[in-house]
């Protein structure tokens, strides 16, 4: 609708810092990797040059290794912890030392398709950069073909129950005193716990001590969990990268090989007992024991599985809106705490795109309709309580506005 379209555009403009967009004022005052790619897709619905600018700015932060960091600290901001001084990274732009879900190739393709001529120079430049990033994932973040994370923030699903077992193995000895900033912006009941934060910071301190050197960090790793979210997202991104590469005459053989490796890897995440795609501890073995909204990214990755449709029906029947981030029947369900229950519009979007691509139109329509109703009734929050739709986390949120413009609205 017109009022909501205007409100969504005003959010994107309000969070625009000139060349990049922050997720929301206060809580997240920098450029976040996947947030920014959703922002670019949102901008592309009314300003394609601005969409390309967002993408190009993100890639100015790419490391020589190919890694594209999860946060770029373009300008100092005391309202966020842990900032650039804690990460201690020396990439081309001050940044964090880990990556984030690589949705970029997929949204770059969507932006390019809207005006192929105007986008040609961009994709000619970006395809090799995307290939370097995907190659880095294949080299440093795969276990039996599934993509693992080295820090919960790398998955973007910070406190998902998926990581509980692996996080419990970490003794965050020596983490020291630090002051969280997130709970000054958002109620603590909607954020990760102190036990989680001690381990988040401990893992950052370890990376810094090792100079963020991939080979050193791979020795005796304290945390490595293969994630259905990262695996399906890279799988999908890789298919899109192959299409873009073909378009600009960049070699595609290597990219096609990665797709095959990831397809096999995805099957190593099938938890027979739980009947769903699940996260898997890549150091010690064992399941995350979590049916999450990332499990439902299978279709987005191009992997269809009838059991997952049945799981989706069940999960959607338990909550009024969209797809809860964790099984509402699960023992750890918490309708307000970040990735342990709340609905995320961006995840619904990726799930909906996947369902539609696999021909499950009825389910795709249902996910979209509930997401649209959620935003119409409760605004552009960061995430929402699945039971009553109550807005949670940050307000005036970039990616929620972006998916309204590009998909839900
Ligand atoms: C945070 O600070 O909560 C972010 O999710 C880290 O990426």
Image: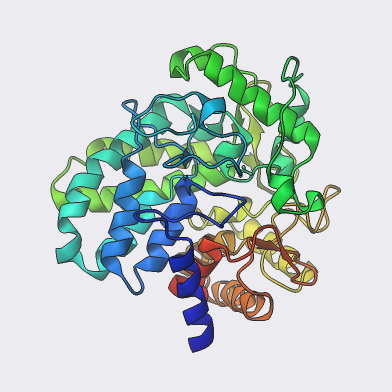
Query: Where 382 falls versus 176 (above or below)?
Result: below
Q: Is residue 82 visible?
A: yes
Residue with the most extreme bottom position: 2
Residue 134 lies in quadrant: top left
Q: Is residue 1 visible?
A: no
Find residue 322 and report its horizontal and vertical position in percent. Answer: 67, 69
Q: How many dots with numbers? A: 0
Find residue 27 and report its horizontal and vertical position in percent. Answer: 62, 51
Q: Foreground residue, 402 or 19?
A: 19
Q: Foreground residue, 185 or 294?
A: 185
Q: Foreground residue, 193 or 155?
A: 193
Q: Residue at x 44, y 56 (%)?
A: 21
Q: Residue at x 50, y 69 (%)?
A: 11
* Quadrant containing ligand 1: top right
**Lateral position of residue 381 relative to residue 54, left or right:** right
**Lateral position of residue 402 relative to residue 283, left or right:** left
Find residue 35 and report its horizontal and vertical position in percent. Answer: 49, 53
Find residue 375 and report its horizontal and vertical position in percent. Answer: 62, 75
């Amino acid at each position: 609708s017109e009022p909501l379209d205007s409100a969504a555009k005003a959010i994107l403009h309000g969070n625009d810092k000139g060349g990049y967009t922050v997720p929301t004022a206060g809580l997240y005052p920098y450029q976040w990797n996947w947030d920014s790619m959703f922002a670019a897709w949102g901008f592309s619905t009314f300003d394609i040059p601005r969409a390309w600018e967002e993408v190009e700015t993100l890639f100015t932060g790419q490391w020589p290794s190919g890694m594209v960091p999860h946060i770029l600290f373009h300008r100092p901001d005391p309202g966020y912890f842990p900032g650039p001084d804690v990460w201690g990274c020396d990439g081309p732009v001050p940044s964090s030392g880990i990556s984030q879900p690589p949705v970029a190739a997929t949204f770059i393709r969507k932006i390019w398709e809207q005006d192929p001529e105007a986008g040609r120079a961009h994709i000619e430049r970006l395809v090799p950069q995307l290939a370097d990033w995907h190659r880095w994932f294949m080299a440093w973040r795969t276990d039996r073909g599934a993509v693992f994370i080295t820090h919960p923030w790398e998955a973007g699903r910070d406190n998902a129950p998926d990581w509980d077992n692996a996080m419990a193995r970490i003794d965050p000895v020596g983490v020291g005193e630090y002051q969280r900033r997130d709970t000054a912006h958002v109620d603590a009941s909607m954020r990760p716990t102190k036990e989680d934060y001690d381990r988040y910071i401990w893992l950052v301190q370890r990376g810094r001590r090792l100079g963020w050197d991939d080979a050193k960090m791979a020795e005796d790793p304290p945390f490595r969990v293969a994630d259905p979210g990262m695996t399906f997202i890279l799988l999908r991104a890789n298919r899109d990268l192959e299409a873009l590469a073909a378009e600009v005459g960049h070699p595609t053989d290597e990219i096609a090989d990665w797709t095959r490796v990831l397809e096999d890897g995805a099957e190593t995440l099938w938890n027979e007992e739980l009947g769903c795609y699940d996260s898997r501890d890549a150091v010690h073995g064992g399941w995350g024991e979590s049916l999450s909204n990332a499990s439902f990214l299978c279709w987005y990755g191009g992997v269809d599985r009838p059991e997952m449709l049945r799981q989706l029906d069940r999960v959607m029947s338990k909550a009024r809106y969209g797809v809860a981030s964790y099984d509402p029947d699960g023992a750890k369900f918490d309708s307000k705490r970040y990735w342990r229950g709340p609905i995320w519009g961006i995840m619904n979007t990726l799930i909906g795109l996947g369902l539609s691509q696999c021909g499950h139109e009825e389910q795709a329509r249902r996910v979209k309709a509930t997401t649209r109703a959620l935003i119409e009734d409760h605004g552009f929050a960061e995430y929402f309580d699945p039971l009553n739709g109550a807005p949670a986390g940050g307000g005036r949120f970039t990616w929620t506005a972006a998916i309204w413009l590009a998909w839900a609205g």
